[in-house]
Image (spheres, rainbow, N blue to C red):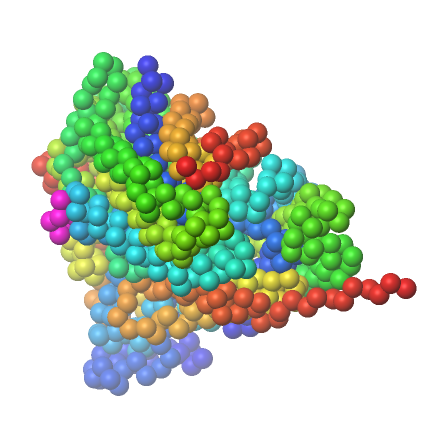
Amino acid sequence: MTTIRIGRRAALAAGVAALASPAVVRAQADPIKLATLTPLTGAGGPYGPVMAKAAASVVEEVNKAGGVLGRRVVLVSEDDQTNPEAAVRAARKLIDVDKVSAIMGTWASSVTTAVAPLCWESKTFLCTVSGADSITLLPHQGFLIRTQPNSKLQVTRVGEFILSLGAKKAFTMIPQTPFTQSTFDILNQVLPKGGCTHQSLIYDDKKTTYRTEVDQALRTSPDVILANGYTPDTVVLLKDLYRAGFKGKVLGFAYSINQKLVDQVGQPEVVEGVYTFAPSPAEGSSAFEKAKAASGSANPDPYTCQVYDHINLVLMAMANGKAATGEAIKENIRKATVSGGKIVDNAVDGIKEIMAGGKVDYAGASGPCDFDEKGDILDCKFRYDQIKAGKFTLVKIA
Amino acid sequence: MLSYLLFIATIGGIYGLLALSLNLIWGGVGMVNLGLAGFFAVGAYASALLTTIGHAPIPAGWLMALVAGGFAGLVVTLSTTRLREDYLAIVTLGFAEAVRLIASNEIWLTRGTDGISGIPGPWKRALGPDFNAVYFLIVVLALLVVFFLMRRIDRSPYGRALRAIREDAQVAQVAGKPVLRFKTEAFVLSAAIAGLAGALYGHFTSYIAPDMFLPLITVYIFLAVASGGTGRPAGALVGAYMVMTLLESSRFFVEWIPGVTAVQRAALKELLIAVALIVVLRLKPSGILPERMPPAPRPS
Amino acid sequence: MIILQALVNGIVSGTLLAVPAIGFTAMFAVLRFPNFSVSGVATLGAFAGYLAYGAGLQMAGSLAAAFAVAGIAGLAFDKVAHLPLIKQGALPAAIASIATGLILENVVRLGFGNEPRGYDRPIARDVFIGDIRVSPQQVETMGLALLLMLLVFTALAFTRIGKAMRASADNPELAALKGIRPERIAMLASFVGMGLVGVGGMLLGLDSSIDPLTGTRILLSLFAAAVLGGLGSVPGAVLGAFLIGMAEELSVLVVGSQYRAAVGFVAILLVLTLRPRGLLGERAY
């Protein structure tokens, strides 16, 4: 492998030469292989395809601009089926056959937990959007980052927001997920401190109606309901809350209560006044606009923004490390966000700056991408919206 | 590439165990188990819990998986064996769903949807990268033991009795065979093997979660047994590897279909499996290794 | 109070469940194998109705579209995949039907993706009758389901073809001797049975949302309804559907919503242990 031994000046020269030569001549060497492993089917099915698409567009742009380290980038996209068994097989194929240096976009916490050992054992870098607290506690030796704030932080913020709404009796409706228990535990801690009682109910996310569940919740006459499911079940839940004439406030996560949900409900008064909460701000930032274009979606969800950041970070890490290995990504992933560096919002500009010997400070679509040593994201800005006449209007970013 | 192939061969071997398990009752007695994924899960959880929380040695976990799988099989058959196979199909389908619900919701026992991580693998630390190869050999060994056991059964008077029940339970009953007992025994043994397969799976990947045991696995195994040949252990094995090859190679060629999105590609992959199952059932119902009826021993 | 409300909710969902359950059990009565492709067909029907409704058809027209598309698909799959296998027994046919169900699910996924979709129907607030809350739309949907069931019962009881169907289900040999052509009856059962399953998928999706897994979600409840009432018994399926609907809603209060999906399984186990032929036995009518 000669590329590893090329000195900095040589690499610089090669980079400049690559930029100068026409696109056809570039990318002669073996392509660099990266992968997305997102849910295209199963429970995560509504999220994965857009995530994969966003990453693919970034790679396309980078290739158009000459690739990275003078090599073309090939993005392999596999389906994890929202199923750890299938995900493990897919990851093995990505690692052993495609020999990708990074896997991005694992969504379900169970999938990430299943795939992570394969990654660190084979020195493949893993970027995930799963929020379960346990993930960054795995012995991953640095081969893992996550752009999603962990659930403890998120739920604490949700609790504080519920209190700021002046709630006295809060009720949580949630399906059984890796976050369910921790959500209860945290809210039971946070809410009473602000003088608010908390009750909760676990529902079956496969049901076609939640009338009885809603009755059960309303019997406690709550003034705030936290609807904490995914889009398909939350649609049904919100409709049934409306039918039941619930007059209090409803709050949910923006990954499930999004434009798609509003469109699908079809009737603005059903979702009128619903608050949404998103761990990833950066809306209005230039990277967010880029992520919009890359995903072909007017309102990319936080996961899509995060995958947009994964691929950009990984590409810039390889440029910084002058090598396309998982090890190089691990060593350099935090060098794409050097304070004082040139502020960039995409890998094309970033790679150009790095190859010219500069430093970059990537401002991502999901926010600033600084990670602690465990791989957890440091930034903890959250965005609160309220739906008014079918439109999401900003309440605050804090 | 080699480690990928080893990995696939190991998973293929575990599917092979499941196929042998299904073959015993489907090919052997003419019963069906649409809840194979459920018994697979029971074994995986039994062994994982015993070896992680219980700190028991791995072989004890595997033994436990056999027992737990068999016990689950007994529970299911107790209410259904005297009834027809169509009821059994529905009950077993429900059983797999119930297992998944329990695994997801009884967090105190199963850690819920988080799943159980850090399931120990035999000599994993000492072996390092060779672990996959050694584990493959372990699975092959398990496969051989079960395979020869199946062959023994297949060729024994017991096996002939099972087949007689499959062909005509009433005649077998009249001929004095304890049909109900035979059916129950076969089902329990089959469920135990599926449980063992689950345990082998868990200790290989080091992590299990309720999402792993979806009904789709059962469909794969049915395709394996149907294509390999029902009623013959070797057929089930060959079938399992054929399905594994189909599953994994479809990954490679759906990438070549132009103009489809990722979701469509995933849908095409599942379509392919389903169509293959129907084609096999329609065109080659006896599978590629058709059943051989061993001649009855001559009276001496 | 909340128990009464749960029972009312259960009756509503039971009525909707009854439609596909009738379809499933009627097919079983005539064709003698459990057709697992009902999951895929229900999804297909829901999407066919969705397209028709989106194209501007009225409710009746959309239901007819769901019925026709699902019926034709069911008929085609029975002809090509299931019935040729029935000679080898009920099992191969049942297994093939799992595969055809998977095919339909993925055909829908191929065309529509995974995103849930909703019928563009106005959502109204519930009205209170005493202390009991009912949704006007669900009453409407329930009315449609009841009307449909009435139609089926009338057809089975009074038309020549309905009588022939019952005769054939009760005793195929005898029916054949009387000049009833079994293939025709089989075709009719496939078409009407799956048509009902398709309509059921649409009715269940009307007030919630539909996606490629719509049918799979109701599969176990549907089987439970049919087995509870006695596999092959049409009135039994209706009774079973009501009981399962109510039991599932009550289970939310008793063991919690997360175990709702197990209600069907437990019901099946109980019935098979205590009353193996179902509540109303296995006679078709």
Name the residue at the right extreme: B300
Nearer to me, B295 or B124: B295
Q: Which residue is found at the position 59% from the left and 41% from the top?
A: B83
Name the residue at the left extreme: A389
Nearer to me, C15 or C6: C15
Nearer to me, A207 or C157: C157
Q: Where is residue A352 in the image (x, y as percent from the top left)?
A: 23, 70
Q: Position of residue A291 (x, y in %)?
A: 21, 57
Does C24 appear in magenta?
no
> Does A193 sit above or below residue B250?
above
Which secondary structure is most common in the magenta stretch? Answer: loop
Nearer to me, A280 or A40: A40
Q: Which residue is found at the position 33% from the left and 14% from the top?
A: C1
State the image quarter where residue A390 is shown.
top left
Q: Which residue is found at the position 22% from the left and 81% from the top?
A: A23
In-image side of C119 versus A44 (left or right) = left
Q: Is residue B193 visible?
A: no
Name the residue at the front extreme: C178
Q: Which residue is found at the position 40% from the left and 63% from the top?
A: C80
> Does B150 sit above or below residue A183?
below
Locate the N terminus of chain A by quadrant.
bottom left
In the image, which residues are magenta?
A: C53-58
Does C57 appear in magenta?
yes
Locate the C terminus of chain A by quadrant.
top left
Q: Where is residue B261 in the image (x, y as percent from the top left)?
A: 28, 64
Q: Can residue C244 be seen in this view?
A: yes
State the image quarter where residue C29 is shown.
top left
Q: Position of residue C168 (x, y in %)?
A: 43, 47
